[in-house]
Amino acid sequence: MSQTPLKSLHKSPLESPRTLWALAIGFLIIWFYMLGARTLVPTDEGRYAEMGREMLASGDWITLRLNGIKYFEKPPLQNWMNAISFALFGLGDWQARLWTGLCGLIGVAAVWFTGKRVYSPRVGVIAALVLGSSFYWAGMGHVNSLDMGLSGMMALTMCGLLLGQRDGVSVTEQRNAMLICWVGMALATMSKGLIGFVLPGTVLILYTLIARDWRLWTRLHFGKGLLLFFAITAPWFILIALKNPEHPHFFFIHEHFERFTSGVHKRGGAWHYFFPLLALGIIPWLGVLVQGLLSGMKKTPARFQPGLMLLIWAVFFFFFFSISGSKLPGYILPIFPALAMLIAVQLEQSGSRSLQVAAILMVLLGLGGLLGVGKAIDISKNKPALEQALSAAYANWLYVVAALALLGGAVSWLLARKPGNGKDWAIIVLATSGYLLSQIAFLGHEPWGRYIAGSTHIPAIQKELVSATTPIYAVGRYEQALPFYLQRTVILVEFPDEMQFGLQQQPELWIPKREDFVAKWQAHQLAGEHAVAIMRDDVYDDLKKTGLEMRIIGQDPKRIIVAVPAAR
């Protein structure tokens, strides 16, 4: 009887149910709290919240619209999920991020379960800790954008493939895992288009060529998988094409081929665009990244090589988006589940040296932050006073982030040097500090978020909206978040923004010429009608010079908001 307590004292925290449950509960409390802790920040967050709101309000679940205008850039899954969230829980910030948050958790759960089955229970736990604490994954899990929705479904695809192809899998397990893989590809396609199956398919081809595992293609359950894939994807694509014949060409040609091969969206970048973003995104595990990638090259006696598959997945996705003519920071997010598993394998199979390197890099990051935040504030001194104040306020949060990185890295380094369970505790401390610093950094950004969204002006605008038909004009700019918070679409003037294609189909929904807006504004004034306009300050100055009467009800460096003055 005296041996049991002694054993428990030496039990690894990565194998202790009590420790793991405590970590999971703490992780989830913070994760769900942060979904509603910030204002929806334009552009993506406001856009996809508004599209979901309009879908629910209109009852049209086929034709996608933004600001009441046909918007065919992406498939509907994100909008469907947001609309369902609004229908169940009402309109709000956390409701708009719920699907994104769940997709982030799906990724964490998938790498835990897959790591456990393909490698070992410890690898599964470490993979979940690595992914859940990586700056990009933990951060983007709280941003209402398509990137996490796609990445969560890609994680299902990748993990289903690994589970279905691993050595020793039963026929039933293989079938079920591969069907999950096919479902993941279908939902990824419904999230962001053809890359949902083109990229995993290319990874499979590359793996086959490199590993020479030709028989793998006989284990994919093509028949059932294709039926399932098309049952999920085909109905919407058929229905939207029937209702909107212009959709197929725009979606498949413009949004896929032209977007990849050209700079049509003016979102280009150098070939090394994603390298610094990868370094930032994998924090606090940057010191183990290269070793983790190299571990994927180690050949094992097994038929199926999961490490090689993970390596090809991460490298090919990174390469694909690097050569694309369209680049945005979130595009590489789908590689992080693969990186998390590779890093977990490296941490489990090696000594503590690589972990010590990661901890030292965290210390250096913290020191650099403490020294660099002040310089960043100096750079903002040539900006408007409001933005200077916001930068100064955010600096206090960044000092906390830097201090936490310094402390977490130092404690992890000390623990990693200890024998016994020191290494395992170091992994937990590094993961915990990495997760907390990402959430603190996002939470501290909230004043900036309110400013970017313009949400401080909502009460003043609402006072002018005396009826459901009171018009709001967007002159020279489109506010991506205010329509959602106001629960109103706006009338675009002069500036089509990203709705140019939809306005070509529905030109009656906007005012292309400024003089036509002026005439409408003057007509509102003569009739004693209420109206609001949101515009850039240069547009306001130009209109003021013409003698147009406007009453300012809100103003900041990004926008001026005016209302129709009373008739004389």
Image: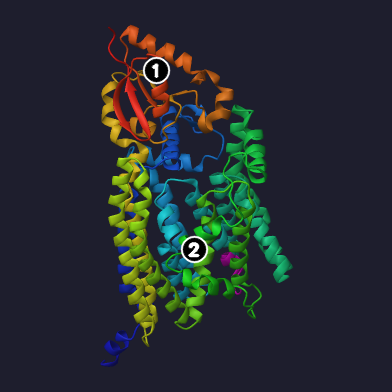
Q: Can you give x and y, in whole percent of width and height, for residue 469 in the image?
A: 36, 18
| Residue 269 visible | yes
Q: Does 474 sit left or right of 267 as displayed?
A: left
Q: Does 333 sit left or right of 222 as displayed?
A: left
Q: In which quarter of the image is residue 372?
A: bottom left
Is residue 185 depicted above or below 516 in this figure? below
Q: In which quarter of the image is the C terminus?
A: top left
Q: How crowded is mark 1: few (under 14 residues within 10 Å), some or many (20 or more)?
A: few
Q: Can you give x and y, in whole percent of width and height, for residue 450 in the image?
A: 32, 41
Amino acid at dot 2: Ala
Whether residue 164 is in magenta: the answer is yes
Q: Can you give x and y, in whole percent of width and height, for residue 247 in the image?
A: 62, 32
Whether residue 122 is in magenta: the answer is no
| Residue 16 visible | no
**Which residue is drawn at the image coordinates 54% and 60% (left, top)?**
275
Which residue is the site of mark 2?
Answer: 279
Marks 1 and 2, how far apart at CA? 50 Å
Q: How crowded is mark 2: few (under 14 residues within 10 Å), some or many (20 or more)?
A: some
Is residue 59 depicted above or below 88 in this figure? above
**Which residue is drawn at the image coordinates 34% and 34% (left, top)?**
485
Secondary element at tag 1: helix
Q: Which residue is at the front of the view, 63 or 281? A: 281
The mark nearer the N terminus, 1 or 2, is 2
Which residue is the site of mark 1?
Answer: 545
Q: Does 307 sit left or right of 565 as displayed?
A: right
Query: What residue span does the magenta drawing correspond to?
Result: 162-173
Q: Which residue is at the front of the view, 229 or 464? A: 464
The chosen color scheme is rainbow
Q: Nearer the viewer, mark 1 or mark 2?
A: 1
Amino acid at dot 1: Lys
**Which residue is drawn at the image coordinates 44% and 67% (left, top)?**
130
Instruction: Using the image, tell me which numbered label, if any, was put on residue 374.
Output: none
